[in-house]
């Protein structure tokens, strides 16, 4: 799932997911889209639990931070790995949001190939390219 309000970023993300799926015998990922936290919370009620959520912190309405806290405090969703996926630099705020095993930080890549690599690693649960807190 991707939670982002930027149409171009969403289109690029979904295009990458589609290309990844074409390269495999059967689909390895799907692209559930939410344009904000409210959309994501509603969507989560109606879809199979996603393997991970890519979250842009700069979404409108309920902030990315508030959305993250809601998910982590809800037993239905608390185990879903959340990848803070943003153009923001690694700030103190991002570091405070990171939790080992559940929340990660990934800068939005500048290339399509890098985006595909990041999605594949996230879907497979391999986060070598992703900063994870050790505290």
Image (cartoon, helix red, strand yellow):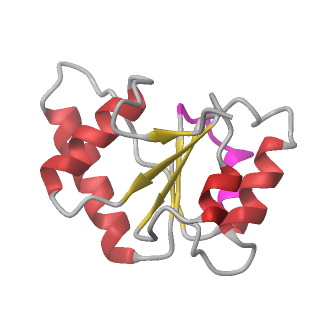
| Residue under the image location 38 percent in, 76 percent down | 7
Which contiguous range is marked in magenta? 39-51
Position above or below: 77 against 37 = above
Q: Is residue 50 magenta?
A: yes
What percent of the width, then of the height, locates residue 76? 81, 33
What percent of the width, then of the height, locates residue 66? 78, 64
- Closest to the observer, 118 or 61: 118
Q: Is residue 37 magenta?
A: no
What percent of the width, then of the height, locates residue 78? 77, 35
User: Horizontal placement of 60 versus 73: left or right?
Assistant: left
The quarter holding residue 6 reads bottom left
- Closest to the observer, 85 or 11: 85
| Residue under the image location 23 percent in, 55 percent down | 15
Position above or below: 78 against 32 = above
The quarter holding residue 120 reads top left
User: Horizontal placement of 6 versus 98: left or right?
Assistant: left
| Residue under the image location 80 percent in, 53 percent down | 69
The quarter holding residue 124 reads top left
- Closest to the observer, 6 or 129: 129
Instruction: In the displayed orientation, state which residue is furthest to the bottom.
Output: 60
Look at the image and tell me in which quarter the C terminus lies. Answer: top right
User: Horizontal placement of 103 versus 45: left or right?
Assistant: left
Q: In this figure, what is the number of numbered marks?
A: 0
What percent of the width, then of the height, locates residue 98? 65, 46
| Residue under the image location 72 percent in, 80 percent down | 61
């Amino acid at each position: 799932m991707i939670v982002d309000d930027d149409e171009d970023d969403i289109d690029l993300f979904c295009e990458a997911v589609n290309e990844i799926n074409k390269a495999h015998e059967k689909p390895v990922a799907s692209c559930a889209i939410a344009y904000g936290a409210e959309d994501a919370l509603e969507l989560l009620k109606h879809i199979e639990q996603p393997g991970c959520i890519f979250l842009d912190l700069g979404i409108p309405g309920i902030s990315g931070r508030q959305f993250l806290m809601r998910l982590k405090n809800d037993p239905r969703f608390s185990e879903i790995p959340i990848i803070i996926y943003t153009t923001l630099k690694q700030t103190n705020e991002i570091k405070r949001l990171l939790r080992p095993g559940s929340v990660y930080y990934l800068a939005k890549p500048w290339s399509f190939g890098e985006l595909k690599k990041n999605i594949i690693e996230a879907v497979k649960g391999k986060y070598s390219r992703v900063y994870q807190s050790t505290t």
